[in-house]
Image (tube, rainbow, N blue to C red):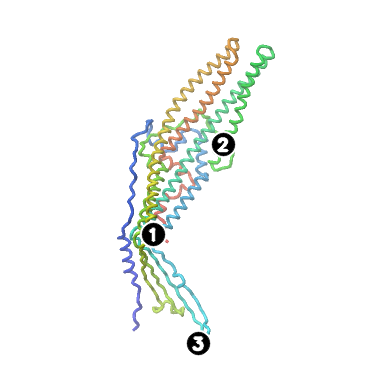
Amino acid sequence: MKAAAARPPALPVVAIAIALAAGGCTVGPTYERPALAVPADWRTPTTVSATAADGAWWTSFGDPAIDALVAEALASSPDIAIAAARVDEYLGRYGQTRAAQFPAVGLEPGSTQVSRQRASRLAAGIPDGVDAESSLYAAALSASWELDLWGRLRRSTDAARADLLGQEEARRGVVVSLVAQVVSGYVALRDLDRQLEITQATLASRAESLRIFDLRFRGGVISALQLAQARAEFQAAAAAVPPLRTRIAQQENLLARLAGRNPGPIARGKPLTALAPPPIPAGLPSDLLARRPDLRRAEQDLIAANARIGAARALYYPRISLTAALGVASPQLSDLVSGPARLWNVAGALAQPIFDAGRIAGQVAQAEAQQAQLVAAYRKAVQAAFADVDDALSATARIRDELGALTEQIDALKTAARLARLRFDNGYTDFIEVLDAERSLFQAELAQSNRQGAALASVVDVYKSMGGGWIDVADAKTPAAGARPPAERADALPVR
């Protein structure tokens, strides 16, 4: 009877390894959100429900041109494509880091082969009649696994996952910025259009005045000085038109780039004065921590730094690795699966730092310092976010008051310009009084257009700074809308 072939003690070794890995501890600090001084409310109170920021607020302007431009930008912006590709890059990094927690199985290097050779009879002392040729058939699987007893690999995986989620929040931040830039850019374009209309209307009025003054001068009614003053005012209005046309073209090109297309004209919808601003959303300052992508990213960076402290501290402890090989080798292919052809080995390796001249201590100190920096950066980002919202809310209230004053000023200046013209026509005043009144009216009308645009832009800033569910609505219009969230994709990565 043949003796039973020896079998590798695979199950006991694997069982022990799993028990050791499962019972291992994780070194390093547990993450806790830093203590924050959160204001109870905004300095400028709001009365609208917070749910106002959960929908496509840009549609509240009632301008199909804005809606189309935002949709085009979300679908075609190269900035979103770059950010999405960066998320995929970090998804790959996460998968690479996570794979180190699991056994690696493959063909044994150098042990899987098919070879045939002929030896020199003279050199090997092979007598005549003995075959000098030999064959070797061999195949072997190898496996290696580092037991993560102290959590070094787990903490590295936690850091990589936080990096991935941080990049996803960065991508969402690009969506926020893009929508705000497109809407604000369109409002600025309509403001420039309105300023051009005011300037052209003023130019036409001054052209008519110059024509009349020229006739009066020819008739000897007015002096050459008054004619020159009228001509100078006409040329001043004419000189204001080209810069406005240049700024309009530049603003159109900016919007075209945001929309992901070549420079060109931008379709217009409603005029500036017909745009209805969205309602001002409400919300508590503490809500920003969950609503703003930049704050969520800052916290993920902090989580990653916290995990890297644990990974660095784990370097102080022993690293235990298991390796195993199982295969067959035979000079005859027909005997490759027979008992005597089988081979195996199991080995363990232990690495323990004893003296490294402070290398590990330096790594730990570096990780702790980076974490301290990110704590400060997180608190700074939160305070900046509070200021962003408060500034935007304050601006909306103050600009409304300013617009009311400008409207009353324009009404008064129109009356003053009309009366100054009557006084001049009747010989009661000099033409300089008419010029002063008309100049003031022109500048006030331009200022009113500018502040109307600023009022709408301040509402955009409120939505941008508050964040909210509208980001998900906008994100659904991007090319990656059908993909699963990266957190789910990360947890579902296959182990290969």
Residue assigned mark 3: 126
Residue 174 in sight here: yes
Numbered badge on residue 118: none
- Left or right of 30 on screen, residue 74: right
Judged from the image, the secondary structure of the residue bearing numbered disc 2 is helix
* Residue identified by numbered label 2: 252
Upstream in sequence: badge 1 or badge 3: 3
Q: Residue at x 50, y 89 (%)?
A: 127
Residue 93 spot, x, y in % from top left:
44, 55
Kindly identify which residue carries mark 1: 357
- The amino acid type found where label 2 is placed reads Glu
x and y, in percent, of residue 183 in the image:
49, 36
Mark closer to the chain start, 1 or 2: 2
Task: Specify few, some or many for label 2: CA neighbours under 10 Å numbering under 14, 14-19, or 20 or more.
Answer: many
Q: Amino acid at mark 3?
A: Ile
Viewer-nearest residue: 7 or 446? 446
Choose mark 3 or mark 2, whichever is in front.
Answer: 3
Residue type for callout 1: Ala
Q: CA distance from mark 1 to mark 2?
A: 61 Å
**Image coords of residue 221 (percent x, y):** 66, 11
Q: Is residue 366 left or right of residue 232?
A: left
Instruction: Please give the name of the residue rendered at 65% of the width and 19% of the height, measured from the top-left corner.
Output: 228
